[in-house]
Image (cartoon, rainbow, N blue to C red):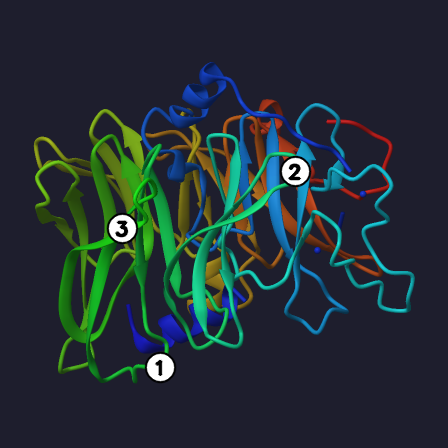
Amino acid sequence: MGKKRIAALLLVFCLSAGCGPVGQQTETERAGLENITGSSKESIYFNSYNKITAAPDGYYTLQMAFGDGGDGSYLTYISKDSGEETYLCSKPDCSHREDSVFHPMLHSCDAYVECAMHSSIRWHNGFIYLLEYDRSTYDVTLSRISGDGSVHEKLVKIGQAPNYGTYYKYVFADEDTVYYTYDDPDTALEEERTVSLYKIDLRTKEITEVYSFIGRNASVSFSLMALNRSLFFRQVTAEEDGVYKEYLMRYDMDTGKTEAVLEEAITSYTLVGDGKLVYAVPKDGLYLYDMETGEKEKIRACDEETMYVSLAWDGTYLYLDNVETRVFYNGETERKVFVCTLEGETVNEIGASADYVDLTDGEYMIMRMFVQGEGVFWSYIKSSDITNPNVEWTVLRPEREEKL
């Protein structure tokens, strides 16, 4: 990974809504989501910069509240059953937005969040979690919101940041444990710095550093994934000659030991079950790697449309998003998502918009789509249509009548 690619990634990772409360999930529903991919629930996402998070009966989104100074945010809920996108607000008479030219969010609305860090939304066991940012103190706090939006609770301060950019990444390991990383954006590219992996005990609010290392332009914030009692992440450092050394690391939550699974320059990886993962090597191809035996197999070679890809896995199909091919290789490349078998065979090619596809969870594939003359909306493709060569994205306009 070169310096230009890292800078471009920061640009690439850089909005629609109406009031529908969602109740707590049953234990069966929770277990179903945890095992949705047969591997890791993070495998349904194409990257770590998600603006949407999956729950058993729908999806929660975190969006910028334009017209509110550019700092406010709001939450919406997209129902799998009704196909409606609504503000996450439990107040029956709430109008959600002010009656003004910019229509900023009402601060009294349950859906309003004063200042949330970009792409920090997560769902876990009936609650929506996000990172809130205090512009006066620079504090970053892990907070949670109830399923109907009525209760906002600050849980624990996890650190500070110069602004509310995407510098923190976190995942849930179990009911009471969160792991997170932080990359300091103020460190110059050529400087040596220490980066760490932290554990939060939500019962005691105790934060413990469980792993750290020092390196030039060091990073551990890429692609955190939890599987059983292991945590996976990519570790990157810059060498003296400007070449980046990259490892896929595994942290054992029981022993506290961290080891390198792979030393490979990869753009993306996804856990596909049975102790295996698939990773993408730029301008080379996709590899299936068995973590038990150490054996790897090249399952697909790159072509002009897939020199750089982001990966996701829905338990049945492997998905390749080629947005980075346009950024790092050829800006004229047609935007596509390639739907493949685990053997690398293409079963469909689906056109996409300029942004990343967000997730594909075995029920829907969802992304943000710009509609000329209207704006940006969430859009979806049903998984039952995922192999249809003529399938088109359905745009989730708040006022639309058709249902999922």
Name the N-terminal-most of marks 3 and 1.
1
Residue at 60% x, 34% y is 147
Query: Residue at point 29% right, 73% down?
Result: 2
Distance from the alpha carbon under mark 2 to that under mark 1 = 37 Å
Vertical comparison of 174 with 16: above or below: above
Marks 3/1: CA distance?
26 Å
Q: Is mark 2 on a helix, strand or loop?
A: strand
Disc nearest the viewer among 3 and 1: 3
- Label 3 sits on residue: 206
What's the residue at 84%, 61% (across, down)?
373
The kind of secondary structure element at disc 3 is strand
Residue 97 location, quadrant: bottom right
Mark 3 near mark 1, Cβ–Cβ under 8 Å?
no
What amino acid is at disc 2?
Tyr
Residue at horizontal 75 percent and vertical 50 percent from the top: 109
Of residues 204 and 348, which is closer to you in this image? 204
Q: Identify the element where label 1 is drawn.
A: loop
- Towards the viewer: 234 or 98: 98
Say whether residue 390 is left or right of residue 201. Answer: right
User: Which mark is drawn over residue 380?
Assistant: 2
Q: Which amino acid does label 3 sit on?
A: Glu
Q: What residue type is labelled 1?
A: Asp
Q: Is residue 389 visible?
A: no
Q: Name the residue under label 1.
A: 186
Q: Residues within 10 Å of mark 2 (few under 14, many from 20)?
A: many
